[in-house]
Image: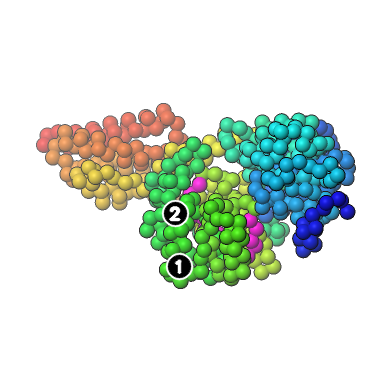
Amino acid sequence: MYPNFDKEKMIDTELYKAKTLYPFQEITVKGILNEFEENGENFNLLFQLPTGGGKTVIFSEIAKEYIARSGKRVLILTHRIELSVQTSKQLSAIGVQNKVINSEVKKLDPEEDYNCYIAMVETLNNRLHDDENFIENVGLVIVDEAHYNSFRKIFQFYLDANILGVTATPLSSNKALPLNDNYNKLMVGECIASLIEKGYLSDAETFTYDVNLHGLKIGSNGDFTVSSSEMVYGNYFMQEKLLFAYEEVAVGNKTLIFNSGIETSIRVEETFKKRGYKIRHLDSTFSEKDRKDVLHWFKTTPDAILSSVGILTTGFDEPTVQTIILNRATRSLTLYHQMIGRGSRKLPNKSTFKLIDLGNNVRRFGLWQDYINWQDAFKFPDRFLESRLSEGDDVEFEVEFEFNRAVRDRLSTTILDSFNLKDVYYEHQDNGIKGKQAVDDSLENHYKAIMEVATDFYDGLELLEMLNEHIEYRLKQYTKCIAKSTPNYFKFLMETYVRQLRHKLRENLEDE
């Protein structure tokens, strides 16, 4: 036995049963090790595998094999203490003596001879700046949740080592710092559909509810801001929609609800409690003791509901979850997959789980099970992201238009609200009519609303000016429908529409 080996940790390991590798995981381990052997030092590999595919089991086995083959040490980097502990248990269970470098570990005892170290990135960064030889003879650095950019600061200390990054979504958390800057190659593992088909993951039964996202704002990180999300999701109507969706689909299921903000989550807890449901709220401000208490309650209560905020997307594994509710909107594909993945763990009596989307996320990203070309995402991240809705149009396309008071006071918005350009466009498509006819129909609808109240041509022009934003809103919907939204084309479309509407008003109002 190694000197000073943690006895409590050893007892804990005895209770932690080593996870046996599935056939596809064994193939993956061999493939990754072969990549490093063939490419030598200074070769960095990124490995993609969906949440629930067993990334920790795979890279723990890689660490074991690498140590045996090379005689060098392995360093594993995580960004959360829960992931460090989880990894340490798996390593110990398969016979790899390891040490977790937490905030209490200031120096390494020279009498301790570990071949594998696990550290959170900030803690290790501090130690390495004090002593760049803090951990010597490292041949392989394994980065868990490699899409986070915080790990980059560590790479400078291990330029001669191989780096293996593992992630479910090989897209950098910072668009300005793509992953292909640091990794030479991406290896793609089994896709979600394949893992479901082979019985390794539960399948998702998806339920979507249209949500008005008007009011959401996009922050500097590219995602919707917490403050604007709180405004949208904290109101009474959204709480009622959430409750309705739960009662329609998931009553009696163990349910995990993801929210964007703490205030919203607390209101969710209050709303569900009033209806007599067993629910608790959890966020990052909870103490470790309180957090463990809530999670133990959730684990042991059959029909429990847990309303959470940004704390259970990684490092949380509760296979008994039967329903995932996305009570938020996100523009992050990574977060989208992380949240849904919490329900995908397989059990003997659980082959499916339910997904309730209250953020138009499925429309934004597609079904969770859909194929994604991760090689394209890795090689051309900008193009991959730009192929989806642009930041501004994303919100404009999916929300209902809200008329200002001046328009509501002058015009009959009932006429305008009765026309939905998207619906008309697709109806024409189904009937073999050119989609452009939807624009003509829209123009006729605007003309009808103006003519109902206009007293003369100049009054009609004033009303036309007031409807400018609504016209723009509709035409943006049209350009999305036809997947043609270049600035020049939209400008041409807008100018033509207004000119034709003005001409139509002149013909019928100028003599009045």
The quarter in which the C terminus is drawn is top left
Residue 54 highlighted magenta (yes or no): no
Q: Residue drawn 12% across and 34% down?
A: 511
Relative horizontal placement of residue 409, taking residue 348 as reference (left or right):
left
Residue 85, percent across and down? 71, 53
Residue 497 visible in the picture: yes
Between 282 and 441, the one lying in front of the other is: 282
Between 478 and 218, the one lying in front of the other is: 218
Q: Could you say whether the residue bearing mark 1 is in a helix, strand or loop?
A: helix
- Residue 64, numbered circle: none
26 lies above or below 14: above
Residue under circle 1? Answer: 273
Residue 376 visible in the picture: no
Residue 317 highlighted magenta (yes or no): yes
Relative horizontal placement of residue 380, taking residue 413 as reference (left or right):
right
323 lies above or below 140: below
Give the residue type at disc 1. Answer: Lys
Residue 253, percent across and down? 55, 68
Circle 1: is it few (<14), some (14-19), or many (20+) Cα within 10 Å? few
Q: Residue drawn 55% across and 70% down?
A: 303
Residue under circle 2? Answer: 263
Q: CA distance from mark 2 to mark 1?
A: 15 Å
Outermost residue toward the top in this view? 488
Return the disc, 2 or 1, that comes first in the chain's sequence.
2
Most prominent secondary structure in the magenta stretch?
loop
Residue 45, percent across and down? 74, 38
Q: From which residue to which does the magenta span run?
A: 316-330
